Amino acid sequence: MLKLASLVDASTDKAAVAVSGSAVITKSIAMNAALTDSEMETQIALEADQYIPNPLDEVLIDFERQGLSEKDSEMVEVFLAACKKENVDARVAALEIGGYEAKVVDIEAYAMERAFGLMCEQMDLDKEGLTAIINELL
């Protein structure tokens, strides 16, 4: 039988946490591919009110380059995600109560997808086979 303790390094104080997809606003936008990440972050901050219906001082915004646009090779597709600060703060506070520091805050569905990939590698699972991941709230 596989024990959870064998999968967890009990000496760590870093943790990952996820917010529910329903609490996150996502949008794919096209941006100039020549922009650095820093320039892109500045541009997104200036234009975020076009994409985010909430007041910008109440949300946390992150982005990830996805690849060159199929429509214009000088543009890159960017995945934009925004979540109310209170949703993130509540999860970070819960980790801190448990003695952990939030290293990563992710979107639940993407976190599950990454967890599945890691499970396949670490447990030598067949990605084409049948595998179940159960996400149950008690």
Image (cartoon, rainbow, N blue to C red):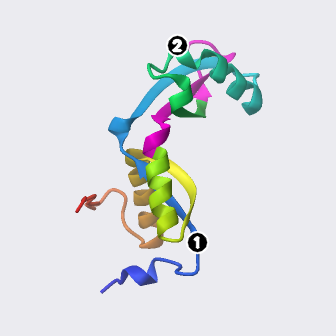
Horizontal and vertical percent position of residue 39: 76, 25
In what quadrant of the picture does the N terminus appear? bottom left
Horizontal and vertical percent position of residue 78: 58, 27
Could you tell whether 13 is left or right of 6 in the image? right
* Residue at point 44%, 19% (across, down): 53
**Camera sees residue 80:** no
- Using a 10 Å C-alpha cutoff, classify the residue at mark 1 as few (fewer than 14 neighbours), some (14 to 19) or many (20 or more): some
Tell me: residue 56, above or below residue 108.
above
Query: Of residues 122 and 28, which is closer to you in this image?
Result: 28
Disc 2: which residue:
50
Could you tell whether 132 is left or right of 109 in the image? left
**Three-letter code, disc 1:** Asp
Q: Is residue 6 magenta?
A: no
Picture quadrant of residue 125 = bottom left
Give the magenta-colored segment's residue range. 67-87
Disc 1: which residue:
13
**Separation (CA) of disc 2 from disc 1:** 38 Å
Tell me the SS state at disc 1. Answer: loop
Picture quadrant of residue 3 = bottom left
Tell me: residue 92, above or below residue 74.
below
Horizontal and vertical percent position of residue 97: 48, 67
Horizontal and vertical percent position of residue 108: 39, 48
Residue ranking furthest to the bottom: 1
Query: Of residues 14 and 37, which is closer to you in this image?
Result: 14
Q: Which mark is residue 68?
A: none
In what quadrant of the picture does the C terminus appear? bottom left
* Residue at point 52%, 13% (across, down): 50
